[in-house]
Amino acid sequence: MNTRDLVLIALFAAIVVVLGFIPPITLGFIPVPITAQSMGVMLAGCIIGARRGALSFLLFALLVAIGLPVLSGGRGGLAIFAGPSGGFILGWVVAAYVTGLLAERIIRPGISEGRQFIGFFLASVIGGILVLYAIGVPWLSAVTGTPLLAAATGSLAFIPGDFLKAAIATLAARAVYAGYPLLPARA
């Protein structure tokens, strides 16, 4: 790991902190708020790749754990990880890794711009939505005592916004990739 990697990891952790300035939207039927920070998973994975993206979220989780109010709504502290959102926050690390891994595998120099858009969008949806929900929803179910099917059904309210976040991340990733590719070079 070189200085450039460390700077990118810290930069994307900072971007997620800034996304936390957007106030959360709480829904009455599920205790997990809608936040812009989950878009950071898609951005980090698609722009800086699997390893650096996951490390940026490990750094972010460390900031949360030591009590800094970096989560949307000014939340932080170890208790967050034991709450309904804990699985989603910890899942950000894995989701960023999977998103980045898919982006690294799909996006290749020389493929058409249209295929790059599709690749970034698929990576964002699979890693940033499917993988994240596969970790966060069971955690939510276990912590709240809600049946898994009910927790999953309640989480469907997040899907339209998540697709919008994936589209925004796709546009941003494609713009960065066109001007200054940061995805790791492949062997």
Image (cartoon, rainbow, N blue to C red):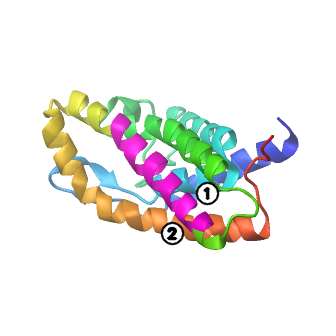
Binning the other alpha carbons within 10 Å of mark 1 as few (below 14), some (14 to 19) or many (20 upward) gives: some
Q: Secondary structure at mark 1?
A: helix
Closer-to-camera residue (68/124) = 124
Closer-to-camera residue (109/68) = 109
Taking the image as shown, residue 35 lies to the left or right of residue 113, namely: left
Compared to residue 148, the image places residue 169 above or below, namely: below
Residue at 57 percent of width and 40 percent of height:
97
Q: Callout 2, which amino acid?
A: Ile
Mark 1 or mark 2: whose residue is earlier in sequence: 1
Where residue 157 sits in the image (x, y, percent)?
Answer: 23, 58
Closer-to-camera residue (44/3) = 44
Say how many tags the image has: 2
Q: Secondary structure at mark 2?
A: helix
Q: Is residue 151 magenta?
A: no
In this picture, which residue range is highlighted in magenta?
A: 115-135
Taking the image as shown, residue 94 lies to the left or right of residue 82, namely: right
Residue wearing tag 2 = 168
Q: Callout 1, which amino acid?
A: Ile
